[in-house]
Structures are given as C-alpha cells and as structure tokens.
C-alpha cells in the first residue's frame, strides 16, 4: 500500500498552533491511517500511560525526560480536542478558554478583591467556589463527584478528605487505628466461617488503612508505592543471597524462604 507524503514547513521552533495543524493533517484523508481511525476510547489508555510517565519523570527529577513526557501529555490533549473539533463539538481553543476562566474565578485573591491569610484559606475558597460552580448542594455530591477511574487508594483518600469537610472524620490517628483493628477482626471472623462478605470486609480494611495514612499526613498511593519498592528490593537481595548459596529459590519451602527473607531484613551482610 502506498501513501502520499506531505510536506510541513521546517521551522527553528514550533508552537502550539503547529502541533494543532500537524494533528489535523494526520487525521485528514491524506494523513496517517492509524491516527485517522482513532477515537477517544481507543487512545484512552495511551493518555493514562503518558500521564504516569510524566509523573515518573517528576519523581526521578529528570528535567529533559519531563519536557519530553509533558509534550506527550499535551499531544494527547490536542488529539482528543481535534477529535471533538471534527464533530463541531468543541476546539482546543475552547479547552484553553475554559481552563483560563476557571483559574480566574477560583483565584479571587489574585484576580479579585478577596483577601486570604495563607494557603489554607486559598484551598478552602477553591473548594467552596468549585462546589458552587458545579452546582453541588450537598456534601454527598462532593464525594460522588470524585473521579471513579482514579487509582483506588487515591480515590479513597480524596473521599475521606471530603467527608472530613462535613465533620465526618476520626478525632485522631488512634481512633483510625482502632477502626482498622476492628475491620481486621471482622475480616477474620468472616473468613473463619467462609462467609459471603469476605471481599466487602477486605475492602473495609483497605479503606480504613487509607484513613490511617491520611490522618498521619501520608499519601496512601505513594506510601504503598514505597512499600512495594521496598518489597521488590528485599526480594532481589533475598534471591541474590539464595543464589550465592547455590540454591534455586523454587526448590525451597516457604519456611526456608522466610528464613532467608528475615536474614535480609534484619542482618547486615556482604553478598560477596
């Protein structure tokens, strides 16, 4: 199959209008067959992956990589906008117009005559304005508006934080830990009788753990990520120690593996 090639003006520096035009060309009849057949759903996962890759660049402190990944995220925004532009629904210009108006409205202390005492009051005003502009009249509506496609830990933490605004929260970390212990007891009880609600009780344990994390001032998503990294590192050290003894991990019993694991966890040693 042969495709006609198209020229695009070479510049010393390209801007957002160039990106928009390139995407329009790619989506045209003379453009790219892959780009042309995409829709919101087909590139939805790509959007998510690009955002996570940008987040990883932030975590690693790699400015060059962050620049590249932010470009990939912007490409996804332009891609989705162009799909809607073709439907005469909205344009990229409408997207930028709406976000600019939102920023102006939600910063009355900068673009208006409101006086604030600090970041805490800024956030309270932001949330109040957001609730008003979205027509949310009840606290329940603010909880229900939390995006359901967020990672589960992140969503749980945001829901807990919004419930706090209505006064529904623990009076301290100790109370949250007690609630977690109660949920673990209920899970054990349900498991012991092979009940039908094991999954529900496990969910309650996870949600309670998120509440403990929130009240301790930790981000639950990041906390679990760090714990997973720690587990992965210890697993590698355990495997290395076992291999140094000339043993295949899979040949060991769980008790034997646990003994190596504890050695890695509790004792400093030289692998070589």
Image (spheres, grey):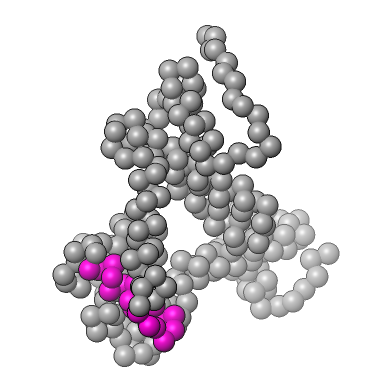
Q: Please provide percent x and percent y for residue 264.
A: 68, 71
- Which of the pair 74/218 is nearer the observer? 74
* Residue farthest front in this picture: 113
**How many numbered marks does the figure carry?**
0
220 with respect to 179 (left or right):
right
Image position of 191 with respect to 89: above or below: below
- Which of the pair 245/100 is nearer the observer? 100
Q: Of helix, strand and loop, which mostly describes the magenta segment?
A: helix
Name which residue lies at 30% across and 57% down: 148
Q: Please provide percent x and percent y for residue 260.
A: 65, 68
Choose top left, top right, bottom left or bottom right for residue 199. bottom left
* Residue farthest top in this picture: 1
Choose top left, top right, bottom left or bottom right for residue 126. bottom left
Residue range in magenta is 114-132
Question: The C terminus appears in which quarter of the rendering?
Answer: bottom right
Name which residue lies at 20% across and 73% down: 139
Name which residue lies at 36% across and 73% down: 112
Q: Is residue 15 magenta?
A: no
- Which of the pair 109/72 is nearer the observer? 109
Image position of 25 with respect to 212: above or below: above
Image position of 36 with respect to 103: above or below: above
Q: Please provide percent x and percent y for residue 42.
A: 39, 35
Q: Is residue 17 visible?
A: yes
Name which residue lies at 24% across and 64% down: 133
Q: Is residue 201 visible?
A: no
Image position of 14 with respect to 52: above or below: above
Q: Please provide percent x and percent y for residue 66.
A: 61, 53
21 with respect to 68 (left or right):
left
């Amino acid at each position: 199959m042969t495709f006609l090639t198209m020229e695009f003006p070479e510049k010393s520096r390209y801007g957002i209008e160039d990106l928009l035009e390139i995407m329009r060309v790619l989506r045209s009849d003379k453009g790219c067959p892959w780009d042309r057949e995409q829709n919101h759903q087909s590139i939805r996962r790509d959007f998510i992956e690009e955002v996570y890759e940008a987040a990883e660049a932030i975590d690693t402190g790699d400015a060059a990589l962050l620049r590249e990944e932010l470009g990939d995220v912007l490409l996804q925004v332009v891609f989705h906008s162009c799909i809607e532009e073709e439907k005469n629904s909205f344009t990229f210009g409408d997207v930028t117009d709406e976000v600019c108006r939102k920023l102006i409205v939600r910063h009355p202390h900068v673009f208006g005559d409101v006086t604030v005492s600090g970041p805490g009051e800024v956030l309270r005003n932001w949330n109040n304005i957001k609730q008003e502009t979205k027509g949310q009249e009840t606290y329940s509506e603010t909880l229900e508006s939390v995006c359901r496609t967020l990672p589960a830990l992140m969503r749980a933490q945001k829901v807990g934080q919004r419930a706090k605004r209505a006064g529904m929260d623990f009076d301290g970390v100790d109370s949250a830990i007690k609630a977690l212990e109660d949920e673990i007891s209920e899970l054990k009880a349900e498991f012991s009788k092979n009940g039908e609600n094991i999954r529900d009780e496990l969910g309650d344990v996870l949600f309670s753990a998120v509440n403990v994390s929130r009240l301790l001032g930790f981000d639950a998503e990041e906390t679990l990520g760090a714990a997973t990294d720690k587990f992965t590192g210890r697993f590698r050290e355990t495997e290395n120690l076992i291999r140094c003894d000339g043993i295949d991990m899979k040949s060991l019993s769980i008790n034997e593996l646990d003994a190596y694991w504890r050695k890695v966890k509790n004792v400093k040693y030289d692998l070589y």
